[in-house]
Amino acid sequence: MGHLPHEFGPRFLFDSAMIKAICEEWSQQGTYLSDLIIPFPSDEWGHLSVTYARHGGSSVPVDLILLPGGRGLEGADLLSYPFLCHELGHNVLFKHDHVFGPRFRPALEEYARSLQRRAIADRGSARQRAQSNVNELRRLWGPSADHNNWSHEIAVDVIALWTCGPAYLATLQDILEAEGLDPYQIGKSHPPYEVRSKALLFASDKLGWAYYTDGIRRQMDAWRNSERGRGRGRTNTYLANASLDLTRECVDASLFACETLGLPRCTPAFIEEIGDRIHDGGMPGFGSELLVTAWLRQNRLDGDAYEAWEREVKESLCALVTL
């Protein structure tokens, strides 16, 4: 990716307006995001910080939000756009990570030390194995500047839930239901989907969205009853790192960050207000209002009717945008 976007068609205008609207919502309480955040077509959602050289030798930092679906406006799937809040969550924590990392790190260290205390009587290879497990735990969970760790991914999931409410739960549920997904796969940059699911259940209970988690709970039950869930996927390595206590601590630190930063919280009253607007035939604006509206519309309309509504609202909003 060696250049900035060079096509400024309807999709670029739409995505730019969405990013701007959400950034303005989030900054009302003084939360700082990057000055220059640009949408960029990609195969999957992502956040990328780059530096571009300008003529004369100077450079400018640019943050790219990677969005799937191609360059055409028809590729903008509004039901997946709560992931935009997930990616912007990375941006806001890059700028304000003092509110999350220092809050979570002591809990991680205390948990790691508790594992070390349990292994204090071990000898030889058993002791080495226990220390290796603790080192791996710190590597996977430890907050780092590049956000390639489990704790930051859970934090931005919680930010998306805080700002989008059940619309984000529905978006992630679509991913969880994908055929062939391994919910217990351990990677460095993202926690296993079962861990992410548990984190969202904890956060939903605290935020009042437990009513909307039945689909995720059913999916987790299906995983547990699968061949992977009965043993092949839930290995000792997985169980050693997928701590419920640590997941709860991470959620608590994430909610603390949301509150400290003054991020706008999606509430039942906000959803009810949007529902009334839909009933009156109102057109949503860019930002979280559009994300929640799309989720409500999809729940109330059949497939063809929803697609017609989505196409109309994207074209209408896009027509209002100017560079």
Image (cartoon, rainbow, N blue to C red):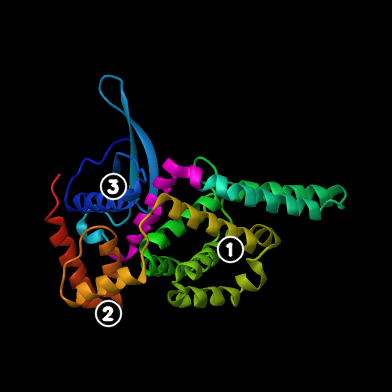
Q: Is residue 166 left or right of residue 114?
A: left
Q: Is residue 247 left or right of residue 51?
A: right
Q: Earlier in the sequence, mark 3 or mark 2?
A: 3
Residue farthest to the top?
56
State the residue at coordinates (84%, 51%): 120
Mark nearer the viewer, 1 or 2: 2
Cα separation, mark 1 vs mark 2, equals 34 Å
The disc labelled 3 sits on which kind of residue?
Pro
Instruction: Check whether the beta carbons of the residues at disc 3 and disc 2 lie within 8 A of each other.
Output: no
The disc labelled 2 sits on which kind of residue?
Arg
Mark nearer the viewer, 3 or 2: 2
The residue carrying mark 1 is: 184
- Looking at the image, is 142 positioned above or below residue 221? above
Instruction: Check whether the beta carbons of the residues at disc 3 and disc 1 lie within 8 A of each other.
Output: no
Magenta-drawn stretch contains 123: no
Image quarter of residue 76: bottom left
Q: Earlier in the sequence, mark 1 or mark 2?
A: 1
Dominant secondary-structure state across the stretch colored magenta: helix
Neighbours of disc 1 within 10 Å: few (<14), some (14-19), many (20+): many
Q: Position of residue 31 (x, y in %)?
A: 37, 46
The residue carrying mark 3 is: 39
The residue carrying mark 2 is: 300
Mark 1 element type? loop
| Residue range highlighted in magenta | 78-99
Neighbours of disc 2 within 10 Å: few (<14), some (14-19), many (20+): few
Neighbours of disc 3 within 10 Å: few (<14), some (14-19), many (20+): many
- Looking at the image, is 262 positioned above or below residue 218? above
